[in-house]
Image (cartoon, rainbow, N blue to C red):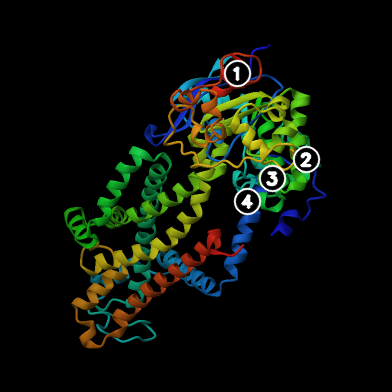
Amino acid sequence: MSGTVESGDEVKPVVASPAAIRWERRRASMGDAWGRLRSDRLAMISLFVLLGFAVMAIITPYVSDRADISAVNTADNPTWASPSSEFWLGTDHLGRSVALQVMWGARVSLFVGLAATLLTIVIGSVIGIVAGFFGGWTDSVLMRITDWFLVIPFLPTAIVLAAVLERSLWTIVFVIGITSWPSTARLVRSQVLSVRSRLYVDRARALGAGRVHVINRHIFPNVLPLVMASTTLAVPISILTETTLSFLGLGDPTQVSWGAILNEAREKGAIDRGAWWYYMPPGMAIVMVVLAFTLVGRATETVLDPRLRER
Amino acid sequence: MSEPVLSLHNVQVQFGGGRVHAVDTVSLDVHAGEVLALVGESGCGKTTLIRSIIGLEPLAAGTITVDGEKVTGNARGLRALRRKVQMIFQDPSGALNPRHSIYESVAEGLRIHKVKGHEPQLVGDALAEAGLRPPERFFRRFPHEVSGGQRQRVLIAGAMALRPRLLLADEPVASLDASIRGEILALMRSYVDRDGVSIVAVTHDLGLAWNIADRVAVMYLGRIVEIGPAEEVLRAPQHPYTQALLSVVPEIEGMEQQILTGETPDPSRVPSGCRFHPRCPLVANGEAERRGIIDKCRGVDLELEPEVGEHRVACHAVHVTRT
C-alpha cells in the first residue's frame, strides 16, 4: 500500500498543494479498495452479472419497441409458443414475447430497486447520524419513531399504502423506502456512537471544530463505508419487495416488472400448462440479480470495513 | 506578577447529574511561560480538570479566565478559547484520525481557525518545529506508518501550529517508550523557552513533574491539596498525601516508604472533613490525635490555606503548625 503512495515521492516538488495531496490520497485508497475487491472472484463474477443486467436495461429501448409487448399488437403471434428462433423465450397467453417482457421488466425492477434503496439509505443515514451525534433528547425521540416503524408489520402496511395511494412506480418506491429505513438508521446510529467517542473527535473539538466540521470530517467518512455496504445489501431486498408487491397485484398495472410477469404467469396458469419459459426467466433474473447484489455487498463490506479484514 | 494566562476560580465539574464530584472547587493561576504539573492518582480528577479548561467537559460551577477574558460555553466563545488554548492527549494513536494523512491532521486546526498564510508552509514549519524533519517526508504518511513518538510529535505540531498561549497535556508521555519520553518532554520545554508558552501537564509520574515543571499541584479526590514551586513541593512535601506519593518513588531516597491503606477514593462518596483523613497516616498513627486536631480532620472540610506565599497546602496539621 505504501508503495503506491510513496512512488515518485522524492522527485515531486517539495511543497505540493493540499488539494493535490488529498486527491492523490483518495485515488490511492480507491485503488487499494478496488484491488482488494478484484481478488474476490465471486464478487467479480457478480459485478459482471450486474453489469450485464444494467446494460440490458439501458439498451432495451434502443433495440426493441415497447409497443411489441402491448397485447393490441400481438394478435398475429402464436400464443403459448415454446422458445424458438423468433421468440427466444417463447410467448405468453397473448402472444407477447417473454424475452422482451423480461428485458423491459429489468428496467422497472432495477429502477425501483435502486430508487427505493436510495430513499432507504438517505432517510436511514440522516436519522442515524442525527440521533447518534446529538444524543440525549433528540436521540430518544428519533429512536422511538424508528422503533415504531420497525415493529409495524411490513406486508400489511405495504399493502394498505399501495392500495390507498395512486398505483404507480413511485408509490412502490415510497412504500419500500418508508418501511425499510429503520434498520439502516439503527445501524448508522450505532456506528456514529462508536466513532463519536473516539479520541480524535475530542481532539478535533479541542482544535476548535464545530459540529458541522466534526460530522463532515470525522463522523461521516467513518460511517460512509458502512452505508455503502448497507446500500448494496439493501438493493436486493428492495427488488424482492417490488417483486412481492407486483406479484400480489399491487404494482403499477401499466408497467412490466419481473414480479408482475410472475403474477401474470401464475394467473394464466403457466405452471399447469408446463409453460416453463413464461415463469422461469423472470424468476431466474430475480435470483441472479439479488444474489449478485448480495455477493457484491458482502465483498464491499469486507473491503471497506477495516474491522472485517485483517490489518 | 503579570496577569495570569489561565485563571481558574472555584471550578467544579460533576458527572452523573451531580452525584460524582470529579473536580470540586479548584482555583488556580498559570502564568506566561510557566509549566505546571498536575499530579495525583488515577481518578483524582486531573484529566477532567484540564478537559474542562478547554471546554470538553462543562463546568458545574466556577469561572475560567484565559488571557483576562472569561470563557463562555457558547460556540463562538469556545472557538476563541481554542485558539489560545490547545491540548495534546495521552494516546496519540487514538487522537489522530486513521483516515487522515499527517498533513491533514496538522492542517485541521489551521483550517478551522482560517489561519492566514500558505498552508503547506505553515504545516511544514509546525512539523519541523516538532522535530519531524524534513517535514515533506511526513506529509503523505498516515498515523499507522510512523512511530508512537512521532505520532505524539504530530499531535504537538497540530496543537502548536495555532500558536496557543497555553498547552494542556494529558499524560503526554505515558503511552510512549521510556527511551523517547525525555525527547518529547524536551520538545515541550523548547516551546516554553522559545515562545513563552505555558503548559499544564497532567501526570501520575512524579519524575516527569520533576523534569519539566516549574510548579507542581497535587490533586486528591477532585481538589488541589498542595501546590507550590516544583523544588519545594518535591523536596519538602508538606501534605501527608504528597509525602506518601513521593515516598514510593524509587529515585527519591531518604524517605520512609508509606503505603497508603484504606479504601481507594471514590468521587461519588467524598468523606466528610478533610477528604484525605480516612487514608491519612497522621490519623492512622494517632499523630493527629496527639496534636489535638483529630476532630477538625474528621469534621472540617478545608481548601488550600489562604495566601501564605507560593507553597500552599490543604492540611489541618500544617495549618496548625503555621498559626
State the CA–CA distance, disc 1 to disc 4: 68 Å
State the CA–CA distance, disc 3 to disc 1: 49 Å
In what element is the residue under mark 3?
A: helix
Residue B74 in percent (x, y) is at 47, 24
State the CA–CA distance, disc 2 to disc 4: 34 Å
**Mark 3 neighbour class, 10 Å CA radius: few under 14, some 14 to 19, many 20 or more:** many
In what element is the residue under mark 2?
A: helix
Residue B259 in which image quadrant: top right
Q: Which residue is mark 3?
A: B151
Residue B139 in which image quadrant: top right
Q: Which mark is residue B183?
A: 2
Residue type at numbered disc 4: Arg
- Are marks 3 and 1 in one subunit? yes
Residue type at numbered disc 3: Arg
**Mark 1 neighbour class, 10 Å CA radius: few under 14, some 14 to 19, many 20 or more:** few
Residue type at numbered disc 2: Glu
